[in-house]
Amino acid sequence: DADVTQTPRNRITKTGKRIMLECSQTKGHDRMYWYRQDPGLGLRLIYYSFDVKDINKGEISDGYSVSRQAQAKFSLSLESAIPNQTALYFCATSDLRGGAETQYFGPGTRLLVL
Amino acid sequence: GNSVTQMEGPVTLSEEAFLTINCTYTATGYPSLFWYVQYPGEGLQLLLKATKADDKGSNKGFEATYRKETTSFHLEKGSVQVSDSAVYFCALRDFGAGSYQLTFGKGTKLSVIP
């Protein structure tokens, strides 16, 4: 079974709709992240959380919100989706073992906003 | 601020050819450096990492050496295989600057033909 899972894997929605992307992990990591990937732009950080009570904005948080419901769950919401939020979204977890923090990524959610 | 610059792709090589993907960085502190690989339809996977100057990361025949004097972390493989076809991302984590974010390059797509 995958250590980091994301649901849904694909989603099509309309402008103005509220949607939620979910991420679950079985790795026991405290730290979780949400990124978006756009062609030619690499990955950009949206939000991150170091534990259940800690939420931090990343590079591009506008238009997004998150909820850390439990150590294992971190969800991303688009309150009112717009077409330029069409992208591939990745959840990641991390730990600090080995002297350098290593991030483990989920398989991604492909979102299309019409 | 921190930044990562990778050679632009796509890169197309014949099987058994030598691979180099250039990566240079700018950081205000003392970064750890990473190469991640993304196979088609999947999330990112850590390929290798280096935490201090002159460290060499290696995995699956890939190598990269942390060169502080040239601020570089070039990825190399002596003989590529068709199964190495993927997108490769260079990334840094700048602990010294108090940053908790991974900064990614834009990715380099590698295609290996038989």
Image (cartoon, coloured by chain):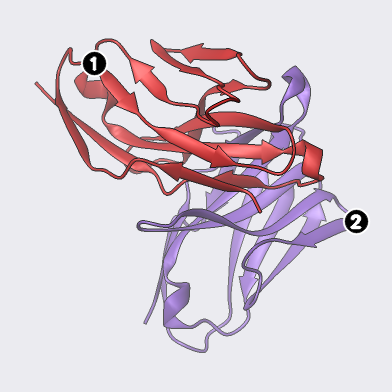
Chain colours: A purple, B red
Task: Look at label 1 and name its amino acid.
Answer: Phe
Quadrant housing residue B1: bottom right
Q: Label 2 amino acid?
A: Lys
Instruction: Name the residue located 44 percent from the left edge and 38 percent from the top edge.
Output: B89
Residue B74 in which image quadrant: top left
Secondary structure beneath disc 1?
Answer: loop
In front: mark 2 or mark 1? 1
Residue contact at pointers 2 and 1, CB within 8 angstroms: no
Tell me if A71 is positioned left or right of B84 in this view: right
Q: Quadrant of the N terminus of chain A?
A: top right
Question: Do discs 2 and 1 belong to a common subunit?
Answer: no
- Report if residue A105 is visible in the image: no
Judged from the image, the secondary structure of the residue bearing numbered disc 2 is loop
How crowded pointer 1 is (Cα within 10 Å; few <14, some 14-19, many 20+) is rated as: few
Q: Residue at x 38, y 10 (%)?
A: B61
**Quadrant assignment, res A47:** bottom right
- The residue under label 2 is A53
Residue B18 marker: 1
